Image (cartoon, rainbow, N blue to C red):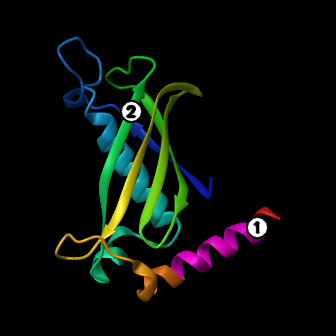
Amino acid sequence: MIFTSQTPIRVRYAETDQMGIVYHSNYLIWFEVGRAELLRELGLPYTVFEEQGVAAAVVEATCRYRRPVHYDDDLIIESSLESFSSRKLRFNYKVLRDGELLAEGETIHVFVDKMGKSTDVRSLPIWKQFEKIIESLKAKAE
């Protein structure tokens, strides 16, 4: 794990189904919220990617549901940047309520250009920013 971020979420009524349980697709939305906040905390909000003509397309998403989540629950979305390369990012997620693991998942992203073609970001300023951030995080860990 390279970096972890925690984002608070309160379950909205519209996110629940007829049984009063959060509908399964909302977890992927929460993963996106957590991922965006993690990147922002690293100083790389997603707008930086777009300004440089690159996007991080989701190519794989998984979620394992462990416990039900209900309306008005206070949750923490714990998002971790697990790995990155010049072509791919991998994030892990945990959905927690009072420390209890309710769901966990992973997304894998590939960098694509404006035409949607897979691309290598080493020629872009964002790559140097990523390297600088990783070096700083490693130095703090030592």
Secondary structure of the residue carrying numbered label 1: helix
Q: Nearer the viewer, residue 107 or 33?
A: 107
Return the x and y of residue 16 as percentages of the image width and height: 24, 23
Q: Nearer the viewer, residue 2 or 69?
A: 2
Return the x and y of residue 75 as percentages of the image width and height: 46, 33
Return the x and y of residue 91 as percentages of the image width and height: 47, 51
Secondary structure of the residue carrying numbered label 2: strand
Which secondary structure dominates the residues rendered in magenta? helix
User: Which mark's residue is nearer the viewer, 1 or 2?
Assistant: 2
From mark 1 to mark 2, how far is it between C-alphas?
A: 31 Å
Reply above or below: 132 against 137. below
Taking the spot 28% from the left edge, 35% from the top edge, the residue there is 26
Q: Count the numbered circles shown.
A: 2
Taking the spot 50% from the left edge, 68% from the top edge, the residue there is 85
The answer to whether residue 82 is left or right of residue 37 is: right
The answer to whether residue 11 is left or right of residue 80 is: left
On the image, numbered disc 1 is attached to which residue? 140
Looking at the picture, which amino acid does disc 1 mark? Lys
The answer to whether residue 8 is left or right of residue 142 is: left
Crowding at mark 2 (Cα within 10 Å: few <14, some 14-19, many 20+)? some
Name the quadrant containing residue 31.
Answer: top left
Q: Which mark is first along the chain, 2 or 1?
A: 2
Reply above or below: 76 against 21. below
Taking the spot 36% from the left edge, 77% from the top edge, the residue there is 48
On the image, numbered disc 2 is attached to which residue? 63
Residues in magenta, as a range: 129-140
